[in-house]
Image (tube, rainbow, N blue to C red):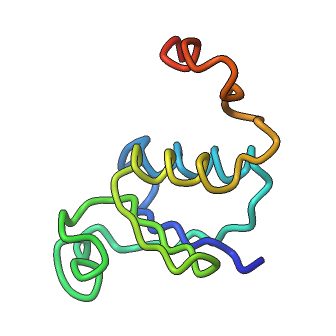
Amino acid sequence: MQPIKVYNAPHGQGPNPWKVIIVLAELGLPYDIVWIPYGEIKSEPYISLNPNGRVPAMIDPNKDVTLWESGAIVNYLIATYDEEGKLTYGDDRLEDKWLL
């Protein structure tokens, strides 16, 4: 499996990229952090990757998927890679998923 790329800004710029990184670590997935200088987040080439001009953004080369916004990335990672149910309940307890 190729490492998933997570785009992050310099240290101390917010918790959202770290949410994605924590999920990747918990799922045992390989990942690389790509550090974007804060002044370059709202310009090319990053703006082509994430039109919102915010971090995080993610490229999953294994599935050819690019996403931005931490919630969307976390949902994608869990739906795609959490085969052992480490971070979710099984489908037999759908009503409990809303309690998270």
Which quarter of the picture shows residue 32? bottom right
Q: In which quarter of the image is the N terminus?
A: bottom right
Which quarter of the picture shows residue 97? top right
**On screen, 83 above or below 35?**
above
**On screen, 25 above or below 29?**
above
Give how far across and how far down residue 10 sits, in percent. 42, 62
Give how far across and how far down residue 49 sits, in percent. 31, 78
40 sits to left or right of 100:
left
Q: Quadrant of the C terminus?
A: top right
**On screen, 70 above or below 91?**
below
- Of all residues, the one furthest to the front in this rendering is 92
Give me the residue at 22% from left, 72% from top: 39
Which quarter of the picture shows residue 63? bottom right
Marks counted in the figure total 0
* Closer to the camera in the image, 36 or 98: 98
68 sits to left or right of 89:
left
* Closer to the camera in the image, 19 or 38: 19
Give how far across and how far down residue 40 sits, in percent. 25, 77
* Closer to the camera in the image, 14 or 48: 48
Give me the residue at 27% from left, 88% from top: 45
Give me the residue at 52% from left, 43% from top: 19
Give how far across and how far down residue 75 sits, in percent. 49, 45
11 sits to left or right of 4:
left
